[in-house]
C-alpha cells in the first residue's frame, strides 16, 4: 500500500528530527529521504513553498552519502536540520 503525502512528510520529518537530535544517521536513512523527496516531487505532493526546502534537504542527503564522515556532516548541519523540520512542519 503506497504512502500518502501526509505519511511521507511525517517519515521525512522523523528522519530529519532524528538526525538533528541524535547527531548521527546512516546512508540508508539518507537514501530513504531521497526516495521520499523524489516521490513527493514527482507526484506533485509538495507545494511550491515546500519544494525549495525539499531541494535543500535532497542536496544535504547527496552530500551526506559522499561525506567521508557522515556523523560530522550531520553535526555540521544541525542548524539546517532544525530549520528544515520547522519549515516542513509549518508549510505542510
Image (cartoon, rainbow, N blue to C red):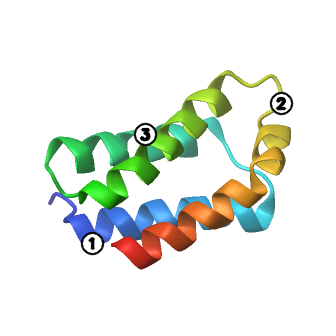
Q: Residue furthest front?
A: 49
Within-10-Å neighbours for mark 3: few <14, some 14–19, many 20+:
many
Q: Quadrant of residue 83?
A: bottom right
In primary-sequence order, the first of circles 2 and 3 is 3
**Between 1 and 52, which is closer to the camera in this rendering?**
52
Name the spot of residue 61 as percent of width and height, x first.
57, 37
Q: Nearer the viewer, residue 24 or 90?
A: 90
Q: Which residue is mark 1?
A: 6
Find numbered disc 1 in the image and state the secondary structure of the residue it sits on: helix
Q: Quadrant of residue 79?
A: bottom right
Query: Which badge, 2 or 1, comes first in the chain's sequence?
Result: 1
Residue at disc 3, secondary structure? helix
Dot 2 corresponds to which residue? 69
Could you say which disc has been placed on residue 34 in the image? 3
Q: Which percent across, then down, holds residue 26?
A: 66, 42
Mark 1 and mark 2 in contact (Cβ < 8 Å)?
A: no
Disc 2 secondary structure class:
loop
Amino acid at each position: 500500500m503506497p504512502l500518502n503525502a501526509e505519511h511521507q512528510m511525517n517519515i521525512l520529518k522523523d528522519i530529519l528530527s532524528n538526525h538533528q537530535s541524535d547527531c548521527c544517521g546512516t546512508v540508508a536513512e539518507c537514501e530513504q529521504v531521497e526516495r521520499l523527496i523524489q516521490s513527493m516531487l514527482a507526484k506533485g505532493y509538495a507545494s511550491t513553498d515546500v519544494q525549495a526546502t525539499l531541494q535543500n534537504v535532497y542536496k544535504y542527503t547527496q552530500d551526506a552519502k559522499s561525506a567521508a564522515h557522515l556523523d560530522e556532516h550531520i553535526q555540521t548541519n544541525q542548524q539546517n536540520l532544525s530549520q528544515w523540520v520547522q519549515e516542513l512542519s509549518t508549510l505542510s
